[in-house]
Amino acid sequence: EDKVVQSPLSLVVHEGDTVTLNCSYEVTNFRSLLWYKQEKKAPTFLFMLTSSGIEKKSGRLSSILDKKELFSILNITATQTGDSAVYLCAVEGYSGAGSYQLTFGKGTKLSVIP
Amino acid sequence: NAGVTQTPKFRVLKTGQSMTLLCAQDMNHEYMYWYRQDPGMGLRLIHYSVGEGTTAKGEVPDGYNVSRLKKQNFLLGLESAAPSQTSVYFCASSYVFGARGTYEQYFGPGTRLTVT
């Protein structure tokens, strides 16, 4: 059974801090790892990672994948109150019959206080 | 371009009642998914579809049925609702990996269902 574990489950920081969110996984036939940000409603896509060691960056957010150690981290520098959200990690694995599925972690709830 | 839409947004059911949640996407995506999200449980896949007329079970399929009669629509049915089905339901869709080089799933706004 595919498994995705995120840590910490919740985190409270002050504006300007840098945070690192962790995601470890066990999945058969791994294809990619995705990060989503979920505020009040639907998750919105942040990054998709398929190769080890290649950092993806978007503004103050960055992420990297280690396929040997089976984990990924999401970094947010100079945090702002608008970064407060649940961050979801999901891993894509082959489920057979030509299709792929995402298995989601439980999420990390980040709260940024002024 | 509306993306992924879901109806209804909220619903309260009594135990034993039935209902259908509708998901529609206008991005010509092949794949569509239904997830449920419960506190502390993350998103769990209920059923998914890799194309019109095909459906498959996900992680938590019991108590739900789905149909994909048209490519743009994916319906989730509850035949006899139970309190354990109280949850927020998200629909998502995506292209087939390789066709566009991405597997990003686009999510709808969610349906909050309460079963009393």
Image: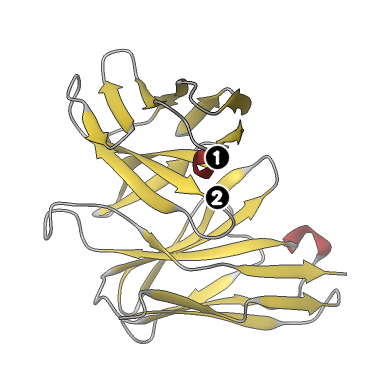
CB atoms of marks 1 and 2 within 8 Å: no
Q: In the rendered view, does A47 fall on the left or right side of A104?
A: left
Q: Which labelled disc corresponds to residue B40?
A: none
The mark closer to the camera, 1 or 2, is 1
Q: Position of residue B108 (x, y in %)?
A: 47, 68
Residue at x-position 62% and y-position 53%: B37
Above or below, B2 against A18 in this view is: below
In terms of secondary structure, where does tag 2 sit? Answer: strand
Residue at x-position 30% and y-position 79%: B52
Q: Position of residue B6 (x, y in %)?
A: 52, 77
Quarter-wise, where is residue B4 in the image?
A: bottom left
Q: In the rendered view, does A94 fall on the left or right side of A37?
A: left
Can residue B106 be seen by looking at this rendering?
yes
**Amino acid type at mark 2:** Arg
The residue indicated by pointer 1 is A81
**Amino acid type at mark 1:** Thr
Q: Foreground: A14 or A29?
A: A14
